[in-house]
Amino acid sequence: MRSREKTLCLALLLAATAAPALAEPLSGPEIQEKIGGELVRLSTPYGITLPLVYRDDGVVAGDISGFSIGAMLAPSEEGRWWVKDDRLCQKWPTWYDGRTHCFTITSLGPKKIAWTRDDGLSGTATMGR
């Protein structure tokens, strides 16, 4: 193999190993496994991190009392969460006007996810207590 061919092969090999693998959205069972029982710190496009606890019994609890926006909304609330069609869905009694929203979840590592809501809003979150 000539020097030029060796250089090209090496460059292709390095490019292939350096490129990150495209993350695939999690399946329903994977979402259940990753989210159930976890404290999820949701990084929002509004610059705040919203702590949500996704209990194994299908209850999701949120508390925004520590944020100035908490004075305008119910400062803490418990809603319901479930998995449907490989998406995480949740519904709050008053937050989001009581509408159901569903999210596509993509793993970014053992304790980090990316989320995309059904209306296109997106962000990241970290898990753990």
Image (cartoon, rainbow, N blue to C red):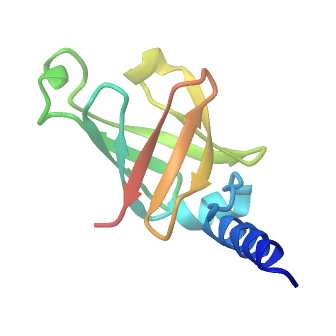
Above or below — where is 78 with respect to 37? above
Please state the total of marks drawn on the protein image: 0
Considering depth in this image, is 24 or 17 the residue closer to the camera? 17
Above or below — where is 72 with respect to 110? above
Residue 8 position in % (x across, y down)? 77, 68
Q: Quadrant of residue 75?
A: top left
Residue 109 position in % (x across, y down)? 51, 66
For the point 27% across and 41% down, the residue is: 49
For the point 88% across and 85% down, the residue is: 1
Considering depth in this image, is 82 or 110 the residue closer to the camera? 110
For the point 36% across and 33% down, the residue is: 44
User: Which of the image's four quarters has the C terminus?
Assistant: bottom left
Considering depth in this image, is 42 or 58 the residue closer to the camera? 42
Seen from this angle, which residue lies furthest bottom? 1
Residue 112 relative to residue 88: left or right: left
Residue 52 relative to residue 1: left or right: left
Residue 38 position in % (x across, y down)? 41, 62
Considering depth in this image, is 78 or 115 the residue closer to the camera? 115
Residue 36 position in % (x across, y down)? 51, 62
Above or below — where is 41 with respect to 56? above
Q: Quadrant of residue 37?
A: bottom left
Residue 21 relative to residue 40: left or right: right
